[in-house]
Amino acid sequence: MSIFEYNGGAIIAMVGKDCVAIASDRRFGVQLQTVATDFQKIYRVDDRLFLGLSGLATDAQTLQQRLVFKHNLYKLREERPMKPETFASLVSAILYEKRFGPYFIQPVIAGLGDGNKPFICTMDSIGAKELAKDFVVAGTASESLYGACEAMFKPDMEPEELFETVSQALLSSVDRDCLSGWGGHIYVVTPTEVKERILKGRMD
């Protein structure tokens, strides 16, 4: 089993019309053994910027703490929040610093930039960015997620329709992956608010 699959997980980010959604499953496991069913994989970096981390849980928590520190330092120096594009470059640079002994994680970044333009991005463990205009996925359920998102995605979805699409894609995909599941955690980011919801899924 790959070290990236050791704790399991599934993360998805999808864009809508002036909005963006990011979702993850809630399972924390050690290979096939489930340890917790309310594990946090999505972190709120700023009001309109979110980070999802899939992979080895210890590396994810370590990296998240480093990124919060760097983001707070940026806000103190610049006196403004970091744009999603800038944050993606920061994450990429930190991962590449460790390229010979990398963090075993796959980050997913989602947020709203200038003019409420949705931004989503994922990268590999050494920081090679993959930008997309529709959706990005990460985790052990990524093959199922790609199929579900390809089938369900439509351009210019309103926030509620985006939430429904992401929810259905996540729940149908984690049912096909024994290393992820136990419900979902979803954030929908709009120019005026952030909606957070917990989904109930199959509990097995």
Image: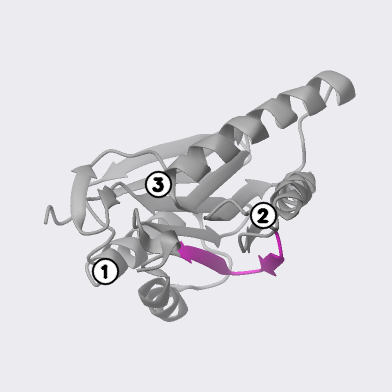
Query: Main SS of the magenta segment?
Result: strand
**Does 45 sit above or below residue 166?**
above
Mark linked to residue 39? none
The residue that disc 1 covers is 177
In percent of width and height, residue 196 lies at 41, 37
Image quadrant containing the C terminus: bottom left
**Crowd class of label 2 (few under 14; some 14 to 19; many from 20; radius 10 Å):** many
Question: Can residue 63 be seen here?
Answer: yes
Q: Mark 2 or mark 3, which has the lower sequence index?
A: 2
Range shown magenta: 127-138
Image quadrant containing the N terminus: bottom left
Q: CA distance from mark 3 to mark 1?
A: 19 Å
The residue that disc 2 covers is 118
Badge 3 amino acid: Ile
**Does 95 sit above or below residue 193?**
below
Badge 1 amino acid: Asp
Question: Can residue 190 be seen here?
Answer: no
**Does 67 sit above or below residue 100?**
above
Q: CA distance from mark 2 to mark 3?
A: 16 Å
**Crowd class of label 3 (few under 14; some 14 to 19; many from 20; radius 10 Å):** many
